[in-house]
Structures are given as C-alpha cells and as structure tokens.
Image: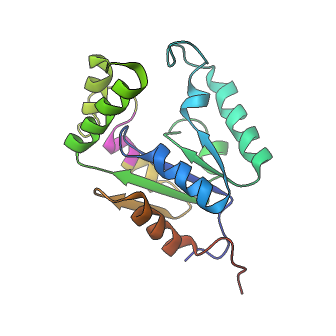
Amino acid sequence: MIKEPPRYILITGAAGTGTTTLARALAIEWQLAHLEADDYLWLPSDPPYQHLADKDLRDEHLLVQMRCAGRAVVAGSIMGWGQALEDIFELVVFLALPAELRLERLERREIERFGSAKPEFLEWAAQYEDGSAPGRSLARHQEWLSRRSCPVLRLEGDMSVAQRLRRILDVIGDPSQPRA
C-alpha cells in the first residue's frame, strides 16, 4: 500500500480500454480533478481531434492544471510529453483488454460520439498490439511503464468500473481516511 494518498494518478492504456471511464469514476469517488490528455493534445475544433496542439504548450498547460487542482487523475497517454510531466505521477494505472473487445468498444464510442467510426482511426487502434504505426503501442507502453519510479498497477482483462476502483483502493488505501 502507498503511504500517502497520491496527489496525481495517471490512468493509461490503449484506446478503448476505459481510461476515461475509470478516471471519471475515480475523480468522483475521491473528489479529484479529472483531466483528459486528449484535451491538451488536440486544439479545440469542430469536429474535434483535427489539429495537434503545440507540444511544449500542451505539456506545460497540463502541468499547470494539475498543480492548480492540487489532486488530479489524468486519463490517456502522455508518453513522450516530457520528464517533468511523466515523472509527476505517484501512481500509474495501466489498463489492458483483448484487442477484439477494445475495438468493439471504440467503434461503438465513435458511432455514439460522431455518428460513424473512421476506418483509419480503427485501423490505427487495431495495430496497438503489434506496434506497426507511430504513437501508442503495447511495446512502447511497456517500455515507458518500466521507467516509472512510482508504483504501476496493471489491470488486465474485462472488469467492471467498481472492480477496477476496488483494485486501486487496495493499493492506495482510502484517501479520505487519515494515515497513522
């Protein structure tokens, strides 16, 4: 168990593993700010996710928001965003799901959000396990996780949000309770 409740937690994994859902639930449960890496990676646009934000500005902007919040849970991938940001977390939770389930969830999410799922996005997401495209891949994530100095909790397989929260609580204890 971690001695002090973490101020900054990162929930990361492949697209479609439930990072946003878990981060949102954790934020509500333990009254943390919930921040989405994609909100800093992409510039606001309609439709969204069309133009990448300036790399140096996105990193600093996310760090400032985290520090202003005091305690925060960040959802998404921040690999390659800079040591100051990557090393600020006191717990990293890595989510993994079978590719078929992940892609099914992603397609459903994209249809709910945008009315359709872009084939090129689904193709990019499908390559995660073999790492054939730039960006996130299982191998890159594993390598990045191996360099973390904080605890890394790996949650593999299809679990409910409540089960995932319970596993996190087992590691960090109840943040609302004082420590001895």
Q: Is residue 134 visible?
A: no
Is residue 139 a member of the stretch shown in magenta? yes
Q: Residue at x 71, y 32 (%)?
A: 61
Q: How many marks?
A: 0
Up/down of 86 relative to 6, above or below: above
Residue 16 appears left or right of 88: left
Residue 176 appears left or right of 156: right
Q: Main secondary structure of the magenta part?
A: helix
Residue range of the region highlighted in magenta in the rendering: 136-141
Percent position (x, y) of residue 101? Answer: 23, 44
Q: Residue at x 30, y 38 (%)?
A: 105
Residue occupying the far right of the picture:
68
Q: Quadrant of the C terminus?
A: bottom right
Percent position (x, y) of residue 95? Answer: 38, 52
**Observer-nearest residue: 159 or 61?**
159
Q: Is residue 162 visible?
A: yes
Q: Quadrant of the N terminus?
A: bottom right
Percent position (x, y) of residue 132? Answer: 26, 29
**Observer-nearest residue: 51 or 165?**
165
Up/down of 50 relative to 1, above or below: above
**Observer-nearest residue: 26 or 12?**
26
Percent position (x, y) of residue 143? Answer: 40, 48
Is residue 18 a member of the stretch shown in magenta? no
Up/down of 7 relative to 122, above or below: below
